[in-house]
Image (cartoon, rainbow, N blue to C red):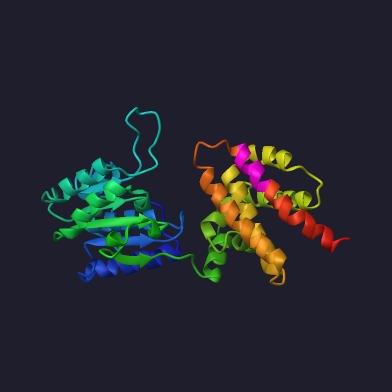
């Protein structure tokens, strides 16, 4: 298992200590932005709790329980995540009721290795309505030594009835110094690390990925595209076509964030309001990109609207 970063270690230690004190609840809702390391923390904690002879606060990696876990066959550890659809052609985008029924059935049994029984649901915010009702029944019948951990980047998508039955642990983005130290230790210059961290709103893992996979260069291009559109130097359809060649969702995400940065640099005026409205539209476009609507139509419409809002402002500024 990968080593924990400082901020992951903080959450891990808090949860492990709660377990040692007998205060780890039956159900825990672990929240925090995508890719911050919720799953790694949950996996590390499961390993520790199931291990027969933990060492220095971590699983030993060698006992029978650890061997079974490493082989993916530990009978008392279950991970519920996206499964293939009925046709076996693609991954579902929801966690469905049969999966949660299997969870309650297994939690009703005595743990086979005589210790704890752990279920990790990742991502719990993808549980659909019917599955949420099945989960609620499980939450209403807590049993000793059975743990249910729900991991969610958007806990607001879970019904309040579920959230209120869980112990809530938040894993926020770390403090800037700690994120900077981690980025620099992975070989980034202070300057590159600082720019990427600002772009990623303080999320160190995103910042690292964007530095490694050309995300920061793409962001600079999106910034330039937005300028060229506002100056009527490029057509929305051309830019949409270019964004189609990249990850359209990431392009719109960058564009939305760049619009917010621009709005923040303006006095609160019509321009600022226009940018804020466009930000909302960009987020709606991102949601639409997950539907069967043709992505180049979504992108073109969004960029036409950018021009509609920005070209007149640009003319005012440079008569
Ligand atoms: Zn072990």
Q: Quadrant of residue 85?
A: top left
Which region is colored magenta?
A: 296-303
Q: Mostly what secondary structure, the magenta segment?
A: helix
Comparing 265 with 216, the one in front is: 265
| Residue 192 in sight | no
Q: Residue at x 49, y 67 (%)?
A: 174
| Drawn side of residue 229 relative to residue 288, left or right | right
Comparing 105 with 179, the one in front is: 105
| Drawn side of residue 230 relative to residue 299, left or right | right
Q: How many marks?
A: 0
| Drawn side of residue 62 relative to residue 12, left or right | left
Comparing 313 with 201, the one in front is: 313
Residue 101 on image: x %, y %: 21, 45
The stretch drawn in magenta includes residue 52: no
Residue 79 on image: x %, y %: 29, 47
Q: Is residue 204 above or below residue 243?
A: below
The stretch drawn in magenta includes residue 300: yes
Residue 143 on image: x %, y %: 14, 59
In what quadrant of the picture does the C terminus appear?
bottom right
Comparing 175 with 115, the one in front is: 175
Residue 248 on image: x %, y %: 60, 43
Q: Residue at x 13, y 50 (%)?
A: 108
Q: Residue at x 24, y 49 (%)?
A: 77
| Residue 272 in sight | yes
Q: Residue at x 23, y 55 (%)?
A: 136
């Amino acid at each position: 298992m990968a080593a924990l970063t400082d901020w992951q270690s903080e959450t891990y230690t808090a949860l492990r200590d709660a377990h040692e004190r007998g205060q780890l609840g039956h159900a825990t809702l672990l929240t925090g932005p995508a890719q911050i390391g919720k799953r790694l923390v949950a996996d590390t904690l499961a390993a520790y709790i199931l291990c027969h002879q933990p060492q220095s606060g971590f699983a030993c990696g060698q006992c029978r329980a650890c061997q079974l876990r490493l082989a993916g066959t530990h009978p008392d550890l279950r991970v519920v995540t996206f499964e293939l659809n009925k046709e076996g052609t693609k991954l579902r985008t929801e966690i469905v009721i049969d999966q949660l029924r299997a969870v309650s059935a297994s939690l009703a049994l005595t743990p086979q290795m005589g210790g704890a029984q752990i279920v990790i649901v990742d991502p719990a915010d993808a549980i659909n309505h019917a599955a949420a009702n099945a989960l609620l029944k499980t939450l209403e019948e807590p049993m000793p030594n059975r743990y249910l951990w729900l991991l969610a980047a958007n806990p607001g998508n879970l019904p309040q009835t579920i959230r209120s039955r869980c112990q809530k642990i938040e894993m926020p983005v770390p403090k800037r110094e700690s994120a900077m130290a981690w980025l620099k230790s992975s070989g980034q210059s202070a300057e590159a690390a600082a720019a990427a961290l600002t772009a990623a709103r303080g999320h160190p893992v995103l910042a690292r990925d964007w530095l490694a996979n050309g995300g920061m260069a793409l962001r600079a291009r999106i910034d330039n595209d937005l300028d060229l559109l506002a100056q009527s130097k490029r057509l929305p359809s051309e830019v949409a076509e270019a964004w189609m060649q990249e990850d359209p969702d990431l392009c719109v995400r960058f564009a939305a964030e760049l619009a917010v940065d621009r709005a923040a640099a303006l006095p609160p005026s019509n321009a600022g309001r226009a940018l804020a409205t466009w930000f909302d539209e960009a987020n709606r476009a991102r949601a639409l990109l997950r539907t069967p609507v043709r992505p180049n139509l979504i992108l073109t419409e969004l960029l036409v609207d950018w021009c509609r809002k920005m070209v007149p402002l640009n003319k005012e500024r440079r008569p």
